[in-house]
Image: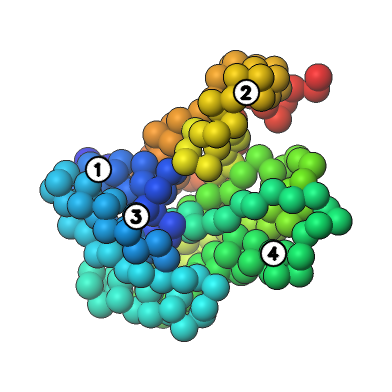
Amino acid sequence: MRLKSKAVLLTGGSQGIGQAIALKFVREGARLAIADREVKALEETVSLLRAEGGEVLPIEADLQDKVQLDRMIDASLEAFGGIDVLVNNAGICRPAPLLEISEEDWDQHLTINLKAPFLASQRMAREWIESGKTGTIVNTSSVNGIQAEANQAHYNASKGGLNLLTMSLALELAQSGIRVNAVCPGFIETRLTRPAIQNEAVITEYLKSVPMGRVGQPDEIADVVLFLASEESRYITGHCLVVDGGQVIKLS
């Protein structure tokens, strides 16, 4: 087991990619604190995890609120006596044309997708350094942090910022033995993307941009997050690993 007895804090873990990460981690022996603001989905995922024999701590938290973010970390530290891996997976994506993006929508994207990972990572880095321990951070970013997509200015900006935050954290924390990496998924089948996938005309056209010619699956992202969280990636830090079926390398 690659994460046997490791304590992991996972944000946004109740659905889609987050749920796949949670299941993968408990199967690999992790003790898991899983945080989400959607209570029903969180409860359903925790039931799945416990059915797998996982040691799980559910935490209801809205990461737009720093008080709740700090309570999430406090609860995780208290439950497990420390955290070995932080996975900043929580995020939102609400497409809208540039001229129709409200200030509120902009702020929510930047807060949840960028500010919350910064605050959680900063807090955990302080905990590790002050206790003389090391740790690993994995951020869930996106190919939208590498290439811009229309109707996604707020999302693009948040994920571009997250990629550079990943590199900045890695640069400053490396001497403390703390590794920081990101995974950048392409088009993955989740609850949010399923309507587009089920629209044959839309998905047929979209897949022309993906050299491998198919939609990615949450498990395929979870496998990469597991790799970055484990000792198998012990000499990797500051890397943004693209998992997109080759989409960003395609010129036309």
Mark 3 or mark 1, which is nearer to you? 3
Please give the residue where the numbered disc 2 appears in the rendered image: 203
* Disc on res. 105: 4
**188, above or below 144, in the image:** above
Secondary element under disc 4, as helix, strand or loop, is helix
Residue 64 lies, with reference to residue 90, above or below; the image says below
**Left or right of 29 on screen, residue 237:** right
Helix, strand or loop at mark 3:
helix
- Disc 4 packing (10 Å; few <14; some 14–19; many ≥20): some
Q: Judge whether residue 207 can be spotted in this image.
A: no
Q: Is residue 125 left or right of residue 204?
A: left
For this orientation, the residue located farthest to the right is: 99
- Along the line of sight, which residue is nearer the eye, 160 or 98? 98
Q: Which residue is mark 3?
A: 41
Q: Is residue 202 visible?
A: yes
The earlier-in-sequence mark between 3 and 2 is 3
Q: Which one is closest to the eye, mark 4 or mark 1?
A: 4
Residue highlighted by disc 1: 28
Q: Residues within 10 Å of mark 2 (few under 14, many from 20)?
A: some
Sequence-first disc among 3 and 4:
3
Q: Report the Cα–Cα distance between label 4 and label 1.
A: 37 Å
Amino acid at circle 4: Asp
Q: Quadrant of residue 73?
A: bottom left
Residue at the image position 83 percent from the left and 53 percent from the top = 98
Residues at badges 4 and 2 in contact (C-beta under 8 Å)?
no
